[in-house]
Image (cartoon, coloured by chain):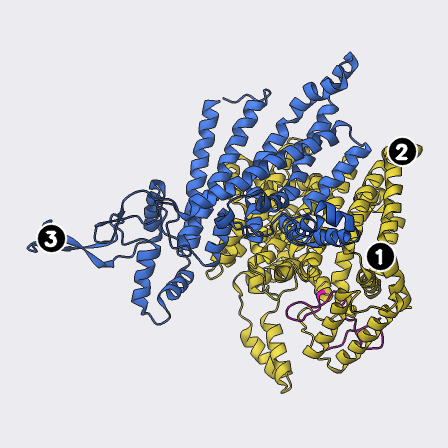
Chain colours: A blue, B yellow
Amino acid sequence: MLTFALRKLIILLLTLLVVSAVVFAIVGGNARALRTIAVLELGPRTPQTEQDRFIQRTIFHQCDPGTGAEVVIEAPDDPEHPNGFYIDPNKCRSLSLAQRYGTWLFGFLQGDWGESIVFKKHVAGYRGVLVDAQGNERPNPDPWGVINERLANTGMLAAWVFGVMVTLGLFIGILAGMNEGSIRDRSLSVVAIGSTSMPEYVMGILLVVLLAGNSMVFSALGSFVDFLPIADTFLGADKWARKSPLQGSANLDKDGITFANTVLPVSAVIIYGFGYIARMTRASMAEAMGSQYVRTAVLKGVPRHQVVLKHALRNALIAPFTVIMLQFPYLLSGLVVVEVIFSWKGFGFALNAGASNMDYNLILACSVVSVIVVLLTQFISDVGYVLLNPRIRVA
Amino acid sequence: MLENLAILGGFIASFWVVWATLLGAALLLSAFSNVVSPLRKPPYSSVTAFALIAGTVGMVFVALFSSPKMGLTTVWALYVLWPVFAALAGVMILSWIFKERLGLYGRVFDSPIGMVGLGICFFWIIAALMADLLPLYGPLEALSKDNGTIVQGVTRKFKLGAEALEGLTYAEYVKLTLAEASEYGKLYKSNIRGSAPLMSWVGNEGERLPAILGTDKANRDIFSRLIYGARTVLPLSIGATLVSFTVGITLGLIAGYRGGWLDQIITFVANAILAFPVIVLFYLIVLVGKDGNLSRILATAIFAFPLLLVLAGLWGLYSVKKGRLIGLLIVFLPIALFLYFRNTWGLPDLSGIAAWAAATFGGGNAAREANIAIAVANFAQMEPRMLNVFVAVAFSSAPGAFRLVRGLTLDVKDRDYVAAAQTRGENQFYIMIFEILPNVRGPLMVDAALRIGYTAILLGTLGFLALGLPQESADWGSMIAHGRGQLRFEPQMAVIPALCIVSLVLGLNLLADTLREQSLKD
């Protein structure tokens, strides 16, 4: 078991290395896009040498000490430089893609993920000492980076989505799979198929139209209240019936994460996701209910709820476990879309902003972080499957 | 005739409470009463369940959106689209009659749910094919300002409802709006640029329908764009799925059949691609890579697989009859290589020929010359932004297809017929393509139907995030993105394209479900 986990872990690290190199080559090898950023930041009339220096210094961090790009000038008799040499602050050599990747990876592993151009601060919270091109220490203005707080927000969203979606999917799948072919099974299957054909952006828009702010359902409710003067007077219905408590766009900086701004994005992702889990659980449950050991239990006279809970359910839940863990990439994609719709300032929102503005370090960091999350869930799924399923023994 | 229909439609829609109550009562009775217990058991249970759910959802929608306008819009849409519905009915009835002889496709007609799914898919396919024959506006045709205001006026009057039209009966109201619409049609006719539609069913020759769903921010007719949207979404999603399947089939067969280090390498690469959330992949390919050659490089890799699959198939069939093989290759290779290089690197460059053709056949007319030049220069070539999207979607769904084919191949390769072929001394490509592949076609077809739907969703996501596809393109995702700013005031601008995506994907999902059930019956 331990060797199995270790092997999986090594493959994971290898994948991560390859994937990060490819992403680095895609993002950093796009010379024209980098030139565009330089022009945007410096203005259109800057000479090309200055643009090059901006790309090297600010985007690639090539001129930082220790990257191997610094231009060392020997000055044996200069009293200002007792070491006998100094680093020219205005020059640095350009590095090849592989060298740059090495430097980036080294910084990345140390927690130095570079600075974001869009958000004007560090991509990750960097607590270490900042050193400028001359080798002097400078104060760290913002120990909290872009990704840290964003990931915390998205983590909250993902936790709610995951908890509710898995519970709902398993519950519906088990109910449907308990007796295959019944009207309950068919209804729930139709619901599940409907769920898998409602992508997040569709559901997000429908929810905003129907439920957010003074939207359709609530304005209909309001006009219904108009017909009921008594409700108006006694229940204060004109207060609650006209405006929805739910918000269609979140202002996390002001309100933080509240019920009002979380419900709609969470439901949009859940409605797309639970159907797939339910269908997988249903298939697995139906198979378990048709198996020999369930038939034996029924014939032995075990009560039905015990057959379902003790015999069928345990075996039926092994397959959905893998499915659920493998849903994570789709969950992350869904979260990006939903964050864009509801302007939820999370990881996906940052990725969208970064990619639209060619924010070099932010795109790199977001891609690698999402790949790490996915690979970790795959690892958990692989190891957990072996742990859960006693029929599989691996060395 | 049209007036009466519209009045009837609006009448039904405005009495939704009665209608919905009756429908709901009937459905609940059929589902939970013992009087009609056969409806609760297979094979009828699926029909009942579908009616129950669809009825409930329909009730909610009718309850929220019902208005005289809805009735009018529905009737108008049905009226304009009647050729589509007629063709749909024709296809469905013919298939129903000959279903015994049509194999797996025919057996879809044994299941009502499958028929619903197939009907929805056929509707969109036929609508996409017939879009030019319908009295619609062009997808990019902005209605002129004067006409636009009239149309907006019609919509606004619908919206204002009671206040603007106080004192009018509903029939008078419908007549008024229809009169306005036909006035609008005449105005439009006087302003027609370009070609009139080939056939016209509404009003007189050359007249087209008013903008029944209103116009968008650029004053283009939303309803026409919806129908034309199928022309962008369907070919892209079907094409990308097919290409990703050829990639998956080629690599999956090799990895599954040969095994060993080849299998390990391909599986590693597939897993590495699958480790990206799709959207991150899209951002990288479409947004970050758009200035570089990334999509061309990916296209070079992806489009090679259809070519390789056909070559391997030909080799498998004719490896002993070299003469016939060479004959076929002489016919096949030039065309295939031409298409391949045109769509990857734009080679050979046809701009010289285009200039020559424009000068020769243009006849001195500048507009015509430009048209000819563009048509020749873009011959057999995908538009670059379209290529970006196509490649991104195909690339992201290829590893899934690969894993499926590999698993199925591993399952099948130890069967007796494979062993028999091996003993006969058949070529390994023959065994892979003509022994293994036909025997795993059931699950592949089911997965293809599902994947086309998923690809349509991905295309919608790309359009929605304004990635890749041209901003003005008529695909449903871009339309949602376009209408999202007006959500509070004109919800139909975003909601109806969204429902189009849902309907297409729902149809494909229902179809896939039925295909799975029917193929399991064997």
Q: Position of residue B443 (x, y in %)?
A: 70, 40
Q: Nearer the viewer, mark 1 or mark 2?
A: 1
Q: Is residue B200 found inside the magenta-colored segment of the image? A: yes
Q: Are marks 2 and 3 on the same chain?
A: no
Amino acid at pointer 2? Ser
Q: Secondary structure at mark 1?
A: helix
Mark seen at residue B225: none
Nearer-the-camera pick, B299 or A351? A351
Q: Residues within 10 Å of mark 1 (few under 14, many from 20)?
A: many
Q: Secondary structure at mark 2?
A: loop
Residue range of the region highlighted in magenta in the rendering: B195-222
Q: Is residue B89 found inside the magenta-colored segment of the image? A: no
Chain of the residue where label 1 is placed in the rendered structure: B
Q: Viewed as shown, does residue B72 lie left or right of A234?
A: right
Answer with the quarter of the image where residue B180 lies. bottom right
Q: Quick one: which residue is furthest to the bottom in this view?
A: B364
Q: Residues within 10 Å of mark 3 (few under 14, many from 20)?
A: few
Mark seen at residue B13: 1
Q: Are marks 1 and 2 on the same chain?
A: yes
Q: Viewed as shown, does residue B169 lie left or right of B484?
A: right
Query: Which residue is label 2 attached to?
Result: B33
Give the CA separation, mark 1 to mark 3. Answer: 88 Å
Q: Is residue B70 visible?
A: yes
Mark seen at residue A81: 3
Chain of the residue where label 3 is placed in the rendered structure: A
